[in-house]
Amino acid sequence: MRIHFLASTALVLLASTAALAGENDAYVLQVGNHDKVNQTQEGFDDTAVAIQAGNRNRATQHQLAGSAGNVALSLQTGRLNTVKQTQGAEGVAVDTFRPADRSSPVKTRSTFDIASVSSAAVAVQDGARNMATQTQIGAYNLAASVQVGKDNYVLQTQGTIGETTTPYTNADGRGTVRSDAPEYSVGSFAGVLQVGDWHGATQEQSGIGHTATVLQVGSDDGSYQTQTGFGQEALSIQIGAANRSTQTQSGLVNTGAVVQAGVGNYAYQTQK
């Protein structure tokens, strides 16, 4: 109770002082033993808060180059919990030029910002050995993961980074530019609540206007949702134990919903 009280009090205090701070705020409170926090922020108007009151918890929050107006919060009160949250990215472009005189090719490497504008990633883990990894690239995204039991895992990805290849030719020779190309997940929402033990949830969204929600209350439930395209929604609610749901949607304007309340149920839905 003391640990929970300290964590709750610290969260209120940090939230009340956030309004007084300027750009790129970072807060860390660790009350237990052997906790680790690594927070990196680039861009502007970012806030990263990590409160760890238990033992041997790890929290790594990256709000990388090009991220703007983002908030990443991680609260862990148990032990051996792991959170990794990344919003935005740094793209890489490699220009390989081959001179007309057949001399050695020349490679030029450059970087550019891939923004995750106005995104928020929240992970709250109260038990033990819970893992949450959330990655967002795009705009207006929210990813939230709450795990109360133990040995639960969540992996949420909104938007991905592909690659483009552009050949060109000039009087001095020819070349090829290979560059990272963000596949934005604009206006997406992904949320996971897992209360029991041994739950697993994986959500991946790429496109426009996606929504994916998972609620698992019992134990040993698994929900796996993948969406590609735009305007898609996926909902999976599993209340019992040992339930499995898999939803895969690729295309446009798709809707998928699964509700399982008992034990040992299986649901598979695919729309393309």
Image (cartoon, rainbow, N blue to C red):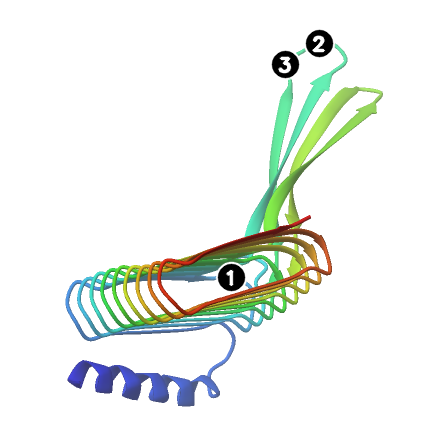
Residue at 26% of width from left, 62% of height from top? Answer: 81
Label 1 neighbourhood size at 10 Å, few (<14), some (14-19), many (20+)? some
At numbered mark 2, what does the secondary structure look like: helix, strand or loop? loop
The image shows residue 172 at horizontal and vertical percentages of: 80, 19
Give the mark toward the camera: 1 or 2: 1
Residue 266, position as x, y percentages in the image: 45, 55
Residues at marks 3 and 1, CA–CA distance in whole angstroms: 37 Å
Q: Residue at x 69, y 48 (%)?
A: 272
| Local secondary structure at mark 1 | loop
Describe the element under mark 3 as helix, strand or loop. Answer: loop
**171 above or below 264?**
above
Task: State yes or no: discs 1 and 2 in contact (Cβ < 8 Å).
Answer: no
Q: Disc 3 to disc 2, how far (Cα)?
A: 7 Å
- The kind of residue tagged 2 is Arg
Q: Identify which amino acid the numbered label 3 is placed on.
A: Ser
Q: Nearer the viewer, residue 149 or 246?
A: 246
Which numbered mark, 3 or 1, is in the foreground of this view?
1
Q: CA distance from mark 1 to mark 2?
A: 41 Å
Q: Which residue is mark 1?
A: 42
Residue at image mark 3: 104
Q: Which residue is mark 2?
A: 102
Name the image quarter holding the N terminus.
Answer: bottom left
Q: Number of callouts in the render? A: 3
Q: Mark 2 Cα within 10 Å, few/some/many (few <14, many 20+)?
A: few
N-terminal of the two: label 1 or label 2? 1
